[in-house]
Amino acid sequence: MGSLWIMRMIPARQQALKALVSKNERPFFVLFPQMVKDNARHFMDAAKKRFKKSHIYYSVKTNPHARVLEVLDSSGIGMELVSLRELRAVKSFSGKKIFNAPAATEAELREALAQKCLIIIDNLSQAQLLHSILKGKPLDVGIRVRMDAHRFGFAPQEIKAAIREMESWGLRMVALHAHPGTNQTLQDYHNFLNRVHGLLVDFPPIRILDLGGGFPGNENLRMRKTGIPAYMELVHETLGEFLPQVELVFEVGRSLVEDAMCLVLEVQHAKVVDNAHYALMDSGINVLSKLSMSPLRFIPLQESGEKKHNFFLCGPSMFGSDEFARIFAKLARGDIVVVENVGAYCTELAWNLSRDVPSVLVVEK
Ligand SMILES: Cc1ncc(COP(=O)(O)O)c(C=O)c1O
């Protein structure tokens, strides 16, 4: 599978990685901003084709690298933000912004107001805090509704009373927000949309319908033989009757960045224990968290061993569980393995344990 990837990889990409290896200490991440741009364009085109009024926002927590944010901002993508740090990172951007943080602090709400974000209300305590900051001044806000049993937002049956309460405080509800959870299959997404439909049938008119994220990255889309246009089609089919009146919002994370970054690792030592072959790498679960839910692919970029073996790839930490992949390759000390699809959450979930988080090198072309 590895060599196939290399054949599929544009030779220029392979050369670029080899050039970086010759000049930089491993391990390192590599970011390809053009892929972020292409993913954004593809998503925007798919939405534009199906809906008159839609706007795409980027879920900044997925990968807040400055170059990622710049590329998306200049592509016309808005920003979906959950913290003061994220708000500060996009302060100079003049595009649309959504602030959507259940545990928002007063400082975060003040900064979100200063940046004219659409604030999504998760609970009445947060609404009350916002009301006190505003000193009675009215504000258009969104309200988050949960479509599953989790703690985010209001349950559907609580929404009407919550809106009445908020409106008595001058918070006018103009947006309804629901997020289906990440990496949705088409079937999951359809079920989610059906639940949203059930809610909208009996709901006061709203200006903005924010459907959150949930779209898989390109690797999973390919494996499932589908694409973003199929998701847009489902939205159109399921919610079409409400769409002429509302602006649709998508808060997209992994689909824009998952495949736009790779990680380059070096084999520090190869060894055999009880007939099993191990390649001891310079990074492992410290940067490849399972929580990222990414379809990681492990591809040898440089192999100098004598014979192919089924290698366990292991990280440098002292955890027994730090065996993160198996590959059939000819690995020896100094060889290089590339991990694909690390653009979503991997930099943000990386541990600081004993070693620094690898730096990010940027390849513009
Ligand atoms: C509220 C909200 N919106 C958007 C996203 C982005 O989701 P995805 O990466 O699946 O596009 C998330 C991620 O968990 C989220 O919690």
Image (cartoon, rainbow, N blue to C red):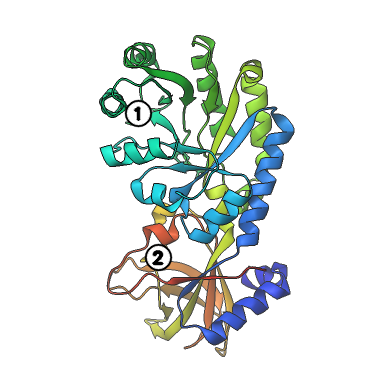
Q: Does 285 sit above or below residue 11?
A: above
- On-image quarter of the C terminus: bottom right
Q: Which mark is residue 287?
A: 2
Q: Does 114 sit above or below residue 236?
A: below
Q: Residue at x 63, y 46 (%)?
A: 224
Q: Residue at x 66, y 75 (%)?
A: 14
**48 to the left or right of 31:** right
SS type, badge 1? loop
| Type of amino acid under label 1 | Asp
**2 to the left or right of 167:** right
Q: Residue at x 34, y 76 (%)?
A: 316
In whole angstroms, how far apart are the C-alphas of marks 1 and 2? 31 Å
Instruction: Tell me whether the residue at label 1 lies in contact with that at label 2, contact meaning CB atoms closer than 8 angstroms.
Output: no
SS type, badge 2? loop
Q: Tag 1: Cα neighbours inside 10 Å, few (<14), some, or many (≥20)?
A: many
**279 to the left or right of 32:** left
Front in this rendered view, residue 27 or 170: 170
Position in image of residue 327 (x %, y %) = 53, 72
Q: Does 264 sit above or below residue 155?
A: below
Is residue 342 in view? no
Q: Which residue is mark 1?
A: 122
Numbered-mark total: 2
Position in image of residue 78 (x %, y %) = 55, 42
